[in-house]
Image (cartoon, rainbow, N blue to C red):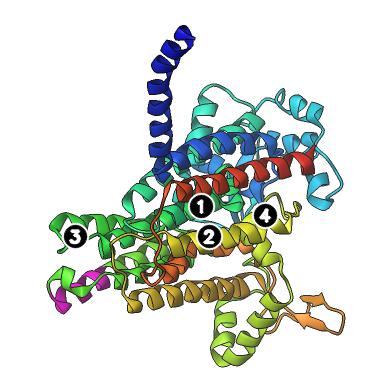
């Protein structure tokens, strides 16, 4: 009996120390997002079969081109069609793994032996073939992937190994960015935590797609403006802040269009922090000009001659003119698009795979409810004005409209797309082709700012931190499980 008592006296302090450290760790979302992101992200990039991320071959071709030092698109000889010259072994790898069979049917599964065979395919970098592109995103969206492929090429890696290296480097770089995003923002830290671990976000971070860097950079830029606007220690804008604003302007210009509209988050910052209205407006004008020059310059140089844009029935400028002359018709088209297709909500939260993995409703709506609840309950002593909350909400909706208009202009025939429809029980409804839920992820953090308030009296306890951590954990487990069930 005496021995047991002495043993308990020795072990109890250790247990208390461990318990205390555990609860303290749960209060730090920036560290939790790294832990969960790495653990589940690596499983996701392994369980996702080769080329089973939306448009992954196109993304890989662009990343490979950039890894060779070709920042701008290449052109097919004798034409104005842009794309990339990549080793023919990439297409052989696609054929060997049977990727196209799973694109076309939800019933087909990945043959693991075929993947093993693909690792035996040599790169043969001198034997190249031109691959036309149907989009050309800014090179920054492929920086992590290109770095991974560059490292792989140094060691003579096979095409499939380069793909996995592109996924891995993308994940590692973007998880580091997630850490600094949550560390930087003075508010909604747990909202950012859930957004980074949302099945759709984590799936894209663990892929070679340009969407992963776009999501992470958009969240980081949002956190930066939250810091500049709400951090109580930032009573005035310092000289060094103008340099950071210039860097943010560059990042905004290098996002997938039209997310550069997030530049208007500048107006969340009180003008008094700049000292005068004149300095305030000059700073915004220079920031906006820089974003326009960078984003517009890239589109002018690199984005004009994609395969889809060269279609005779797709003329973006004519389409924007049509929208300007028919705003009510375009609004009606948007309404019918979103009203009759609930896939957008699924795609926003958990649209993993190549539009061929159907998530359960409990995951989609449960995670969405968690985001709403956490955004309403996660608060501190910082005040956010009504104007700032309303402005953030309207800007997030405006970004959604801009994304929809951009897709309408670049992926649909001029005028109402009569050849694109969705059948309902009663009628045929026109809709805008090319929209998926993941396109609305970048402004999500801005959207949830509207829920930050002091009217709901709630003091976060250890159970809040435990509950939110469990939500992130469940999201990661569910994502890995969905991929395993779908593809194997």
The answer, for residue 402, to whether it is visible in the render is yes
In the image, is 343 to the left or to the right of 279? right
N-terminal of the pair, mark 2 or mark 4, is 4
N-terminal of the pair, mark 3 or mark 1, is 1
Q: Residue at x 31, y 65 (%)?
A: 290
Tell me, for residue 412, which label it has, or none.
Answer: none
Q: Secondary structure at mark 2?
A: helix
Q: Secondary structure at mark 1?
A: helix
Q: Residue at x 71, y 65 (%)?
A: 343
Write down the region rendered in magenta.
Answer: 276-286
Label 3 with label 2: CB-CB less than 8 Å: no
Label 1 with label 4: CB-CB less than 8 Å: no
Label 2 with label 1: CB-CB less than 8 Å: yes
The residue to which callout 3 is attached is: 234
Label 4 to label 3: alpha-carbon separation: 39 Å
Q: Taking 355 as reference, is 453 above or below it? A: below
Q: Secondary structure at mark 4?
A: helix
The residue to which callout 4 is attached is: 363
């Amino acid at each position: 009996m005496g021995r047991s008592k002495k043993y308990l006296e020795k072990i109890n302090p250790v247990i208390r120390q461990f318990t205390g450290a555990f609860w303290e760790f749960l209060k730090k979302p920036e560290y939790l997002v790294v832990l969960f992101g790495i653990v589940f992200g690596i499983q996701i990039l392994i369980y996702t079969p080769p080329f089973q991320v939306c448009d992954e071959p196109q993304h890989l071709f662009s990343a490979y081109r950039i890894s060779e030092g070709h920042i701008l698109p290449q052109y097919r000889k004798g034409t104005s069609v842009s794309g990339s010259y990549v080793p023919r072994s990439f297409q052989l790898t696609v054929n060997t793994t049977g990727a196209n069979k799973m694109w076309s049917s939800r019933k087909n599964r990945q043959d693991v032996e075929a993947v093993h065979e693909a690792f035996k395919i040599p790169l043969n970098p001198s034997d190249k073939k031109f691959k036309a592109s149907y989009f050309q995103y800014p090179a920054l969206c492929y920086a992590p992937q290109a770095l991974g492929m560059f490292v792989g090429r140094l060691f003579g890696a096979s095409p499939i190994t380069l793909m996995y290296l592109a996924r891995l480097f993308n994940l590692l770089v973007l998880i580091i960015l997630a850490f600094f995003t949550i560390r930087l923002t003075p508010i909604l830290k747990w909202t950012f935590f859930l957004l980074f671990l949302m099945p759709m976000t984590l799936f894209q971070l663990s892929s070679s797609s340009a969407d992963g860097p776009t999501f992470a950079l958009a969240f980081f830029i949002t956190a930066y403006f939250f810091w500049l606007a709400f951090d109580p220690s930032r009573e005035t804008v310092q000289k060094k802040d103008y340099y950071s604003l210039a860097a943010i302007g560059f990042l905004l210009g290098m996002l997938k269009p039209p997310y550069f509209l997030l530049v208007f988050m500048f107006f969340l910052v009180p003008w008094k922090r700049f000292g005068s209205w004149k300095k305030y407006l000059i700073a915004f004008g220079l920031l906006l000009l820089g974003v326009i020059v960078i984003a517009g310059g890239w589109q002018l140089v690199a984005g004009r001659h994609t395969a889809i844009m060269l279609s005779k029935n797709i003329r973006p400028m004519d389409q924007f003119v049509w929208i300007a002359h028919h705003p009510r018709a375009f609004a009606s088209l948007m309404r019918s698009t979103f009203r009759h297709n609930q896939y957008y909500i699924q795609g926003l939260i958990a649209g993993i795979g190549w539009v061929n993995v159907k998530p359960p409703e409990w995951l989609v709506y449960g995670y969405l409810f968690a985001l709403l609840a956490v955004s309403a309950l996660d608060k501190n002593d910082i005040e956010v004005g009504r104007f700032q909350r309303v402005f953030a909400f309207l800007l997030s909706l405006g970004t959604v409209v801009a994304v929809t208009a951009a897709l309408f202009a670049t992926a649909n025939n001029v005028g109402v797309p009569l050849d694109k429809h969705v059948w309902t029980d009663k009628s045929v409804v026109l809709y805008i082709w090319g929209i998926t839920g993941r396109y609305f992820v970048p402004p999500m953090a801005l959207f949830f700012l509207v829920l930050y308030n002091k009217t709901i009296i709630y003091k976060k306890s250890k159970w809040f931190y435990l509950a939110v951590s469990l939500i992130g954990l469940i999201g990661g487990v569910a994502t890995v499980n969905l991929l395993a069930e779908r593809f194997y």
